[in-house]
Image: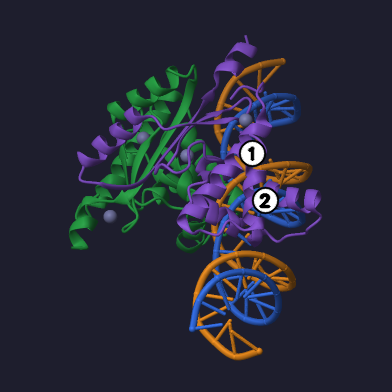
Chain colours: A purple, B green, C orange, D blue
Amino acid sequence: MSALHDHTHCIADALTRADALCAERGARLTALRRRVLELVWSSHRPRGAYAILEDLSQQDGKAAAPLTVYRALEFLVEQGLVHRIESLNAYVGCAAPGDVHSGQFLVCEACGDAAEIDDPGVGAAIIAAAAGRGFRVQRPTVEVRGLCKSCQETSR
Amino acid sequence: MSALHDHTHCIADALTRADALCAERGARLTALRRRVLELVWSSHRPRGAYAILEDLSQQDGKAAAPLTVYRALEFLVEQGLVHRIESLNAYVGCAAPGDVHSGQFLVCEACGDAAEIDDPGVGAAIIAAAAGRGFRVQRPTVEVRGLCKSCQETSR
DNA sequence: GACAGAGTGTTATAAAGTAACACCCATGTC
DNA sequence: GACATGGGTGTTACTTTATAACACTCTGTC
Ligand SMILES: [Zn+2]
Ligand SMILES: [Zn+2]
Ligand SMILES: [Zn+2]
Ligand SMILES: [Zn+2]
């Protein structure tokens, strides 16, 4: 994700979509959950639960407990508003909530950005590989470590 | 992986291949590292570092520290003898050490088995998806949760 | 206002992983 | 044989990540 974009926009968009989706589903996007979502979206980098916790403490002055954050994150993941990056123990905002998908990520080792791709080819290949072995897919996880375009250019 | 196979064989094979590979590379598969590899291979299920630690204590009577196990696992992963399953914080023996690959796994939610597949289609799809976005792949992670063949049959 | 159920707060604890530093021991060198 | 070297291991303490148990609060419904 380019560093040169109006990220305020990304955040605002994400919150608006979240409001709409939750309203539509009858899910309760409470003040706390909305705030945690906003903090997850504070960048395009995956953020750890404890980093978010610290933000809550420092920016909001509320000394919340870990569970508070974990419960909010659990809700957000269930609603598909946030994905968990397993290989980083961290969370990142979903680029396309609403559609059902499990998330495929290109994680840059240099800048830490996690670009979400929902590549049909990758999805299809996984389904095919699993089907060939009689395996019923429930939740695929794809997390590709490497170097993003701009970091390759920078390091030259 | 079927529960009905001579697993002693799996373990013995794995150790033999590990001996050969390490000898070939000049890597030191010490007694401790070999023992940890054996414990990782004690089943086809991914095992946590602390589970292995407990085995070491109980079976060998040695009250080892966590670091002991983590260091051995680090070596084994570097040598490609063991893979780490990110979504489980656990380790499993590699089915095809020697070839360079990063591991793709079908993880059964019911029995816990992790079947390693190195599906060329999945690998190619990931490379293609990344290339299309200018991303240079270093280490892909594919971990598919679902139900394995035998567990689907059992639950009917 | 009473009620039920979802959400939150609080305290304590478990699980997973790492840092710093000392020691051992095999190997190669003088 | 004495000696330096470097990889491997042991030990202690600690950090980070995640969950359990239980009490309280809010919100909508009757
Ligand atoms: Zn942005
Ligand atoms: Zn998504
Ligand atoms: Zn493998
Ligand atoms: Zn199974």
Position of the C terminus of chain A by quadrant: top right
| C28 vs A69: above or below | above
Q: Position of residue A21 (x, y in %)?
A: 50, 49
Mark 2: give few (<14), some (14-19) or many (20+) Cα within 10 Å: some
B153 or A29, nearer to the observer: A29
Q: Can you say whether B27 is above or below A73 in the image?
A: above
Quarter the N terminus of chain A occupies: top right
The residue located at (63%, 26%) in the rendering is A111
Foreground of the two, B40 or B88:
B88
Residue matched to label 1? A12
Give the residue drawn at x 55%, y 59%: A28
Q: Are circles 1 and 2 on residues that touch, CB within 8 Å?
A: no
Q: For label 1, count other residues whose C-alpha is less than 10 Å away and answer few (under 14), some (14-19) or many (20+).
A: few
Image x and y of residue C21, in percent:
78, 43
The residue mark sitting in front, 1 or 2, is: 1
* Ligand 4 picture quarter: bottom left
Q: Which residue sits at x=25%, y=49%?
A: B1
Is D30 on the left or on the right of B68, as rendered?
Answer: left
Label 1 secondary element = helix
Q: Residue furthest top?
A: A156
Which residue is at the front of the view, A12 or A80?
A12
Q: Residue at x 78, y 52 (%)?
A: A60
Residue D21 in which image quadrant: bottom right
Q: Is residue B54 visible?
A: yes
The amino acid type found where label 1 is placed reads Ala
